[in-house]
Amino acid sequence: MLAQSAQMPERKGPMTTDETSKAAKPAITAAPPTKHPRWRRRTPLFLVLLATVVAAGATIYFGIRERTQAEEQLAVAAQVAAVPTVDVIHPKAPDGTLDIVLPGTTQAYIDTPIFARINGYLKKWYFDIGAHVKKGELLAEIDAPEVDQQLEQAYADVTAAQAHLRLSQITAARNEALLKTQSVSTQARDNAVGAYLADQALVQAAQKNAARLEQLKDYEKVYAPFDGIITARNTDIGHLIDAGANSPTSQLFHLVSEGKLRIFVAVPEVYAPAARVGETVAVTADAYPGERFHGTLVRTAGSIELLSRTLNVEVDVDNAQGRLLSGAYVFVHLALPRDSKSVIIPANTLLFRREGLQVGVVRQGHAELVSVRIGRDYGDSVEIVSGLKPTDEVIVNPSDSLISGTPVRTSAPQAAAPGK
């Protein structure tokens, strides 16, 4: 675009040739450059594209970086997760004595069913269940009229036999005197003497029969054979009484003596050598929580029962106050010595393998399987007599797939199983 001619300044005086030529040519000046419209449109688009590329690159970079960090963290977490965490306990050293608890049932020192020794009908009873009786006290009376009649007949037989005896005695004495004068034969004298001796035997037999019936009549009264407590009365007035112990229904009373109680305990064979006669033992009962009764091991069977592999022992407990009842379920505590080298661990630490009984122990960050030998089994815990020390860290509830050399992490050690 041409610019308009600029006005020349006014000059005074004549113009030179050069100035005249310059003045004759019109002055041309360049117009200022201007941007093309297309260029103006492409500049913002380029900036947008550039910003988009930069943003995409940054996104890709940070995404790859974040993913790489996540993979690294995942790898670390996988390595950490690959090392299992186990709970451990320290074995506990046992106390100086071992308290083995064995169940038993109390029995009265004397436990007797009382039967009738004569047939008849119950006439009267004097004591009911729970009654304390003394030895010789009358418990009941039985009416036996047949025995009374037999006794009267026996008395009559004794009288008749005695009468025959007197006659035989006189006859024998008379024949002995007549033999001296040859008035009777020797045979007749011998027959008289023999009859006299036979009548003597008949008198004795009649007297014995009468004594038997007298004793039988005494059985019409039932007496307590010892001091005790009536625990059962199985009869009443008018009941037909059968003599003897042919059936349980013929039992009149049940009498027990509870001043001292017996407890029979089956001691496992492994503890049999420690069950010594004369040892004092403790007895507990659920009816008296926290209280102990004192008993004495008085005798043992002296042999192991083949079926149960136990030793039967008897413990006697003084029960003068009658607090313990016969038939009660009790626990006998036998104090047995312990092995000073043994330790106690929970039963859930044991592993049963082909190599034998083992436990898992953590040593220097790795699991190690150790073979052990059990001394005594207490149910929820066991005594280990070889293979472990109180300082070992024993794995609780070990996995069946646990092998030696497996890396493990340990949690805080738990309290050891209490000793028995």
Image (cartoon, rainbow, N blue to C red):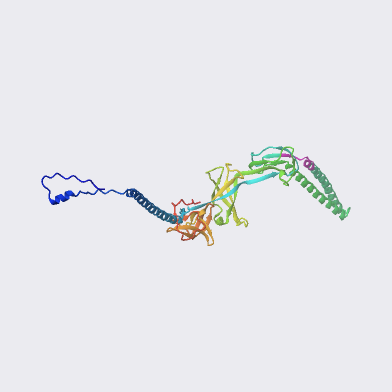
Viewer-side residue, 156 vs 311: 311
Q: How many marks?
A: 0
Q: Magenta span: helix, strand or loop, mainly?
A: helix
Q: Is residue 366 above or below residue 321?
A: below
Residue 223 showing in the rendered view: yes
Extreme-right residue of the structure? 183
Q: Is residue 84 left or right of residue 25?
A: right
Residue 337 showing in the rendered view: no
Q: Position of residue 59 (x, y in %)?
A: 38, 51
Q: Which residues are magenta?
A: 141-150
Q: Is residue 314 left or right of residue 219?
A: left
Viewer-side residue, 343 vs 195: 343
Q: Is residue 407 left or right of residue 16?
A: right
Viewer-side residue, 146 vs 48: 48
Q: Position of residue 13 (x, y in %)?
A: 10, 46
- Residue 146 is covered by the magenta coloring: yes
Q: Position of residue 115 (x, y in %)?
A: 71, 44
Q: Position of residue 314 (x, y in %)?
A: 59, 51
Q: Is residue 34 left or right of residue 66?
A: left
- Residue 72 is covered by the magenta coloring: no
